[in-house]
Image (cartoon, grey):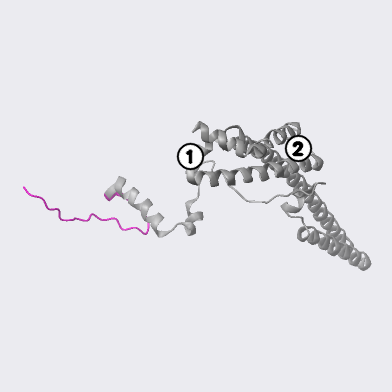
Amino acid sequence: MELLAEQLTETYKREFEKIAPIANRANDLPEKIETDQHQAAVTAVYLDAKELFDSLDTARKTEKRPYGETVDNAFKPNRLDRLERILTVLRDRSDAYAREKVKKQRAEQAAEQARLNAEAEEKRRAAAIAAEFGDTDAVIEHAQAVAETQVAAAHLQSGAPTVADVARVRGDAGGMSTGKGEWKFEIADYSKVDLNALRQFFTPAEIDKAVRKLVKIQKGQTKVDGVRVFEDVATQFRRS
């Protein structure tokens, strides 16, 4: 085993020697990404680390076919494992920065939307007051202003940048990072989950499984709308 590890270490010596410089570059990066320049620098290191990781992992899998698990001793400790840690840390930092950028953009858009809505409402009130006093010209003027504000609000919505647009950062070295929005969830209290709201997503098999468990516990006392609970009798045979 040790001889094989030594042979593999010698075979992939040049590739293994690339790990330390990448790790040093990663250590020199800011712990918190605060600017697009920071993100561009992180992207450059991340892409180099990912390219080396993929190359070495492919080699590991190739060498593993004839030699088995012992190959991992040459590739993983302080090599692939080290690169994987670098990738994880840099991705976490990049995710945090992208979330902040998107959060800021959404807040700015919401504030502008609120401003336009307030402006439109103000013009509507002005039009109503002008109508009350019979000032037709002022009514038309305010009504046109309302329409223009509504158009601006609609354009703000339709032209809103995507998560990818907001998070995108291009580096001088040709690397680029972007973001992908994905809605996730966290169940805070299972006892408060409205199962009726999820009904359409339960398969008959899943419903059967839940009812079967309930009947096993409550037996003849089971009361569930749409479910008929009954005692069945099956013949059993044995020698006395």
Query: Of discs 2 and 1, which sits in the foreground?
Result: 1
Any mark on residue 97, and which? none
Does dot 2 land on a helix, a strand or a loop?
loop
Dominant SS in magenta: loop
State left or right for residue 146 relative to residue 73: right
What's the CA distance linking mark 2 and mark 1?
38 Å
Number of marks in the image?
Answer: 2
Cβ atoms at labels 2 and 1 below 8 Å apart: no
Residue 27 against residue 193 in the figure, above or below:
above
- In this view of the protein, can residue 152 be seen by the observer? yes
Q: Does residue 128 show up magenta in the picture? A: no
- Write down the region rendered in magenta: 220-240
Q: Position of residue 58 (x, y in %)?
A: 59, 47
Residue assigned mark 1 = 69
Q: Which residue is drawn at 77% across and 56% down?
A: 160
Q: Residues within 10 Å of mark 1 (few under 14, many from 20)?
A: few
State left or right for residue 133 relative to residue 239: right
Instruction: Give the residue type at disc 2.
Output: Ile
Q: Position of residue 154 (x, y in %)?
A: 78, 61
Q: How crowded is mark 2: few (under 14 residues within 10 Å), some or many (20 or more)?
A: many
Any mark on residue 33, and which? 2
Residue 78 against residue 200 in the figure, above or below:
above
Q: Does residue 234 show up magenta in the picture? A: yes
Instruction: Give the residue type at disc 1.
Output: Glu
Identify which residue, 46 or 57, lies in the foreground. 57
Does dot 1 land on a helix, a strand or a loop?
helix
Q: Which residue is drawn at 63% across and 42% down?
A: 53
